[in-house]
Amino acid sequence: MKKQTLLFYAILIYTGSLAQVLNHYYGNLHAHTGFSDGNKDSSVSGVSNPSGSYAFAKLSQNFDFLGISEHNHYSSPGNPGFKLPRYQDGLNMAAASNQEGQFVCLFGMEWGVSSSYNGHVLVYGVNQLMGWEIGIPGVGTNYSIFNAKSDYDGLFKKVKNISGAFCYLAHPYVTDFSTGASAATALAYSPYNAAYDSAIIGLPLRSGLAFSTSQNYDDYSFGNYFDYFKRLLYVGYHLGIGYDHDNHYTNFGRSNGGRLVVMAPTLSRQDIMDAMRSMRFYGSDDPNAELHFTLENNPMGSICSGSVYPSISVQHIDRDGELADSIKIWRGFKNDPSGQYAQVVHIQRQSDITQWTDYGIQSGIEYYYFTEVKQNDGQWIAGSPIWYTASAPVTIAESTNTGPKLLYRNDVSRATLCAPAEDFFNYSLYALDGRCLVKGQAQGQVTINLHALETGVYWILFTQHTITKTFPLVITNP
């Protein structure tokens, strides 16, 4: 079953007078096939290569893209057993399987080893295999671009210099990605490095279960990398948080319902890759939950500045009607002298929407904000940050009291929607499951009849020129 994105489930991001609609696409970038140590059930499934794996994934529910990231080295047969000619084969199979607008197929590598002070890094956008092996049976030199084993400094710097490429840290441990075979020189404990920051775009909220054989969407990992994410933000890195499956069996998109969710204008390879590099993504246990997180109309992943106290909006939408038990907004800044990582600065309970303005910032400091949502069933969603630097003097935004307004009481039969100008605007009334109940165009203001609505939560979407806003509407006694 493929996801159809409704207008209500889009966020409008404005740059000048142009509007860009960002849709939500659900998938995974960490998976393996029989080209290395994946498709371990190929004798039963009949699937042993990327082509068959993409075909399988296209039939998974709430799944719009799959990235296959084979191990970049051989070591021994099946462990992981990857050979250089297979890299071009994988790129070709991904290109042949890709269906723009329907399902996106990507191919990359998982670089590195998992021994002490090392670690695995997903690399996409590099069209040649990076490695270190020689003397491999039937191949000889098992790389096109040499990068010594355990040389993460070299890896990050090489990827930085390849246009369109990025690194995504796979199931990271606190002492991983060391430059000196010690914990002290691991990425998380070394000083900030701008070259590394240019290459690394994120890491997962959860990963795996890598060797799950489930096809019932229910075999979740209960571990997480949330604290590691906060540690790297404290060091100063600009990176997002996603979700991994790390499939080694033929269950792409089906081992569990968790998803890497990418916000992009279209379902195309170019837009998915651009969104990943821009950190417009989040990790979700829920397979169809949408997280809208903006700071002064800038989406997650943005690095921005201004002269006003930043206003943050968060909206959680679940197409199955699940509500948010809590929405948290976190804030921090690089090398906080208190030694604290990001701290929770705002909590909203039992609501799918919250807004908060930070009046406690100082000019000249780059702050980062991110959000997490816990649903009532315990499922977890975490979003990539937005970075914001204020210039002095910091003021209250002039638009605070000039936006559209919704005037109503819970126990009356109509609501009035008022525009900030006497120009025409569009409005739509939605049920919580996404059904559009009323839509129209008005000038100045409009009165919407609520008499036929049952008790429950609804949403009104307002658009006028470069303004877009959603209003929660709670009916308690229709």
Image (spheres, rainbow, N blue to C red):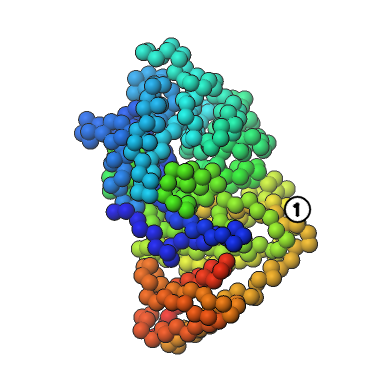
- Horizontally, residue 325 falls left or right of residue 238, namely left
Residue drawn at x 53%, y 28% is 118
Q: Position of residue 319 (x, y in %)?
A: 37, 63
Q: Position of residue 168 (x, y in %)?
A: 51, 38
Q: Which residue is mark 1?
A: 364
Quarter location, residue 68: top left
The residue at the far left in this view is 44
Image height check: is 413 above or below 65? below
In the rendered image, the quadrant that contains the N terminus is: bottom left
Quarter location, residue 400: bottom right
Residue drawn at x 31%, y 45% is 58
The residue at the far bottom in this view is 412
Question: Which is more toward the observer, 447 or 354?
Answer: 447
- Please state the total of marks drawn on the protein image: 1
Question: Which is more toward the observer, 321 or 425?
Answer: 425
Q: Position of residue 72 (x, y in %)?
A: 44, 26
Image height check: is 103 above or below 441? above
